[in-house]
Image (cartoon, helix red, strand yellow):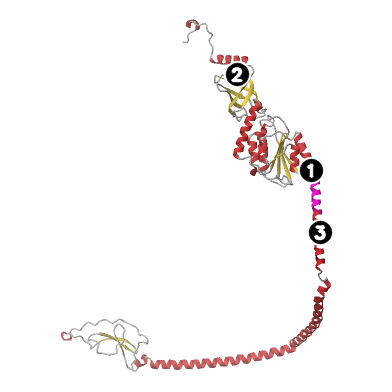
Amino acid sequence: MPKLASETGSNAHEYSVSELAFSLKRTVEETYGRVRVRGELGRVVIAKSGHMYVDIKDDKSVIASIMWKGSVSRLSIRPEEGMEVIVEGKLTTYPGRSQYQLVIDKLEPAGVGALMALLEKRKKQFADEGLFDADRKQDLPYLPQTIGVVTSPTGAVIRDILHRIADRFPLRVLVWPVLVQGDRAADQITEAIVGFNTYPETHDLPRPDLLIVARGGGSIEDLWCFNEENVVRAAANSAIPLISAVGHETDWTLIDYVADERAPTPTAAAEIAVPVRTELIDTVEDYALRIKRGLNRTVERKKLGLEVAKLPKLDTVLSGPRQRLDMALSRLLPALDVNRRAHENRLNILSTRLRPDNLTQNIGRRREKLDNVSRETFTTMRRIVEKSAERLSRSGKLLEAYSYQGVLARGYALVTDTAGKLIREGKPLARGEAVNLTFSDGVREAVIDGISSGASSGALKPMRKAKKRTVKKADENQGDLF
């Protein structure tokens, strides 16, 4: 059980945790109702909700601070780590974490010197990256068809630009409205530059040939959005040539260094963007007049040169060709008449041949001649066939008379061994060797001498069985039996 104060011997008031925490909160807020603090920004975090959490520090201490969304939107510069600032707000505590914090409602750089130091730091960074190099800059179009302007839609700047363009050379102008001051200005200017470079071109809304980023004069804090990194990089990466017209002639921002052309004022930007139409017309007319004069002088000089050269007259040069042409024409007309009469006579002869009675006679004669040729051809062919058949019959009879089959029909036989080889003599044959005898009506098998050497024992020598073979026709190896 907890002891009572009387039991512990102490008269101190006993607080709960919440009572003590909120008592401290009231004490801090009453004692430091509103404070102004100078220090360096440490951690800078802008949450999705829009609130900003920062640390204000010096070389010994750190104060956790918060700035609500409404106050953040009114800032003229974007807070960055390392920036020296002066903040105003009220000091309070956060009981949930037992810590005190500063609720900031106003934040500004600690003098122009702090902003200039940050500006020089960024300038050196971009210069080291080569964003200021002259070879990165593009040439401005001499006479753009469409100009895109990034500026505030309500200020005097846009009116000056439109009025100046209308006076010099009226053309299409597209305005992308943006804030030109405050914390959201840098993001909107960046979106406008990127948007002009990326939106799809249509007939009604063409893509600009030239961009102008413009704002009127102001303090360094007012113009600070044109020193932000996202704006500088968007201008440097623009594929469309860009003119920077921020502030007055003495005002320089980082976008001026990366732009393809810097104008001292917005009105001067319009003058750089387009020529004077009347002056352009006068210039073109002057050029046309000078060209005409030059051509006239050239013609006169050439004419004088021809006169000095004393060239023959045109009639003298053409007299010879004209005479030749007249002579050719005088020969051509009679020749054409003779040619016409010759073709006319030939046509008459051909038309006579093509009359119906002459045509019928010609056809009859042609047909009779064709029939005679056909009869003679048939008779000649039949005679040739009969002679060829007679020669073929005689050759067949002669072949039959000289063939060995005719000899066999007269009673002779053809002797061959079992391999079909012709046997002309009997001496090489051994007793009991099998042979084939070819007669006119077929082939028979035989054995030399009829019996083998073992006939005394009453046993016949087995004969080698001859291979059956069909009668072969005479070939070039067949011997002569006569």
Q: Which amino acid does label 2 sit on?
A: Thr
Which quarter of the rendering shows the C terminus? bottom left
Mark 1 vs mark 3, foreground winner is: 3
Q: Position of residue 344 (x, y in %)?
A: 78, 84
Q: In the rendered structure, which segment of residues is drawn in magenta? A: 275-289
Q: Which amino acid does label 3 sit on?
A: Arg
Q: Position of residue 203 (x, y in %)?
A: 72, 47
Q: Height in image: 380 above or below 43?
A: below
Element type at mark 1: helix
Q: Distance between the residues labelled 2 and 1?
A: 60 Å
Mark 3 vs mark 2, foreground winner is: 3
Residue 42 is marked as none
Element type at mark 2: strand
Q: Main SS of the magenta segment?
A: helix
The residue identified by callout 1 is 168
Q: Distance between the residues labelled 1 and 3?
A: 35 Å
The residue identified by callout 3 is 297
Q: Height in image: 364 above or below 202?
A: below
Mark 2 vs mark 1, foreground winner is: 1
Count neighbours of disc 2 (C-alpha within 10 A) and say few if under 14, some if 14 to 19, many if 20 or more: many
The residue identified by callout 2 is 92
